[in-house]
Amino acid sequence: MLDPVVAIATSPGESALAVIRVTGDDCLQIVQQIAPGCSPSPRKAMHVLLKSPKDSSPLDDVILLYYKAPSSYTGEDMFEIFCHGGIVTVQSIYETLVGMGCRPAPPGEFTKRALLNGKMDIFQAESIEQIVRARSQKEVELSLQTLEGKLSRTFHQLHHRFADLQVEIEAKISFPDDVPSDDSSIFIELKKCSQELQKHIQSFSYLKKIQSGFSLTLMGRTNVGKSTLFNALIGYDRTLVSPYPSTTHDYVSEEVIWDGFSIHIYDTAGYISDAVHPLDIIFNDRMTSLFHSSFQLVYIIDTVDFQNEDLALINQYKRSNMIIVVNKTDISSPDPSWMQKLPPDIPIVEVSAKNKTGIDHLIHHVTTDIRNSLGPSPDHYVNERQHTVLIRIQQILQRLLPPSKPFLDQVAEDLNEIVYILKEELNVSHSRKMLDDIFSHFCIGK
Ligand SMILES: Nc1nc2c(ncn2[C@@H]2O[C@H](COP(=O)(O)OP(=O)(O)O)[C@@H](O)[C@H]2O)c(=O)[nH]1
Ligand SMILES: [Mg+2]
């Protein structure tokens, strides 16, 4: 076991509860000094009044959980103290423990110890941070697959395949008379490995897309109900709605999570067709770049006030991932003669933003467009660091595949390098620098 460390595992500020974690050598004796008379049983919650070891003044009324090594997150003796939230109690317990010899834990120290003690491998360790930092449910779902061990199995399988090839080639080079002279099976297997690698490399771009989220911009003439729809979509009254034209200036944005995806919705003042004022011209420029950079454009029409200008703007901004919303259908159904003028290849959704009808239908259209743009979801994904490792291997592999015609000696040499890289990834004793790099991005207490 390593020296004892302590960390506040929850965010600072007022809250019902906070969690303090202690792990390492002597942590049982240390905690017993602030929980006098308490002899904790492993994995059994205990209700305890913590006291200062100096003057026995009360620190807080808490729940203590003791995990005995090796059955703990870190693999060492470990405690979790569930105390009252807020600034004072949490800090006083934390400082008392530091005063008693617990070192403040650096970021990721608990997971780093779990890795060093063989409780998890590097992929699982990284997935924990990915879950904590996830911006969407989809990312959590995929990170949980890595935590469960899918990515570890992928790297192990790749390592086995390359190591088998390595043995086969070494045999061909050392005993050319004893093994078949045809090398084609080796190159077929190398190609298959390269295709497999490519699949995992591509999972990173899937991750990047879901991490950066999607943007949706509401567009349309003034008073068609953009802000009303915006508020209906985000679920509360964020922007001002009024019957007066130009209520919204500039644009406002809010994030929603639909179907596990993070989406930034922009409410705009639309587009000023007769702009002459310099401010209106600047505003139009900003709107235009927002329309172009948005993943999804939602053009809103007022069912009782459909204008030629709507048709002109729709045709001007027509593109994929565009939806036409016919709003205010609580007042009247859309006029069929107008509807037939709309481009037939853009989906149309009828809503009443005021009564919040048709909203689910609109959301369904948006999430379907997101899914279509992403393509099939990978089973799990690689993060940036793992992506760099796979790219490095793929670059080496490319030297061995057509149109190159390498000698077996060259193949053997390159395979040695690939096997070495994969071994380094799977090895429990990673270099200190690699661990420091990885864990420096973690949260404190994780
Ligand atoms: N009847 C009805 N009125 C609506 C609906 N959506 C918006 N409005 C009204 O239309 C006016 C303009 O709405 P607003 O959201 O500010 O439009 P914006 O200028 O496009 O942002 C307000 O008086 C809203 O109450 C709707 O679905 N039905
Ligand atoms: Mg508005």
Image (cartoon, rainbow, N blue to C red):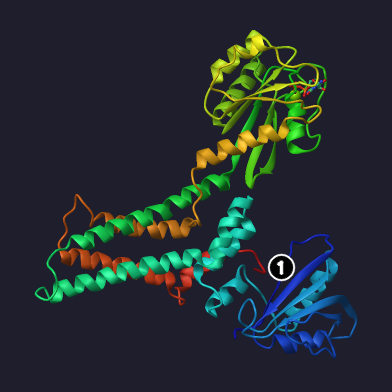
Q: At which x and y percent is residue 163?
A: 30, 71
Q: 153 or 28, which lies in front?
A: 153
Asked if residue 275 can be seen in this view, the reply is: no
Residue at numbered disc 1: 9
Q: Residues within 10 Å of mark 1 (few under 14, many from 20)?
A: some
Image: 132 above or below 335: below
Q: Quadrant of residue 36?
A: bottom right
Which residue is depicted at the point 74% across and 37% down? 234
Secondary structure under tag 1 reads loop
Which residue is depicted at the point 45% across and 77% down? 429
Left or right: residue 34 versus residue 343 is right
Q: Quadrant of the C terminus?
A: bottom right
Image: 329 above or below 60: above
Q: At which x and y percent is residue 143?
A: 57, 59
The amino acid sitting under disc 1 is Ala
Which residue is depicted at the point 53% across and 22% down? 345
The response on whether ligand 2 sits within 8 Å of label 1 is: no
Q: At which x and y percent is residue 214?
A: 59, 39
Which residue is depicted at the point 57% across and 23% down? 346
Left or right: residue 76 versus residue 189 is right
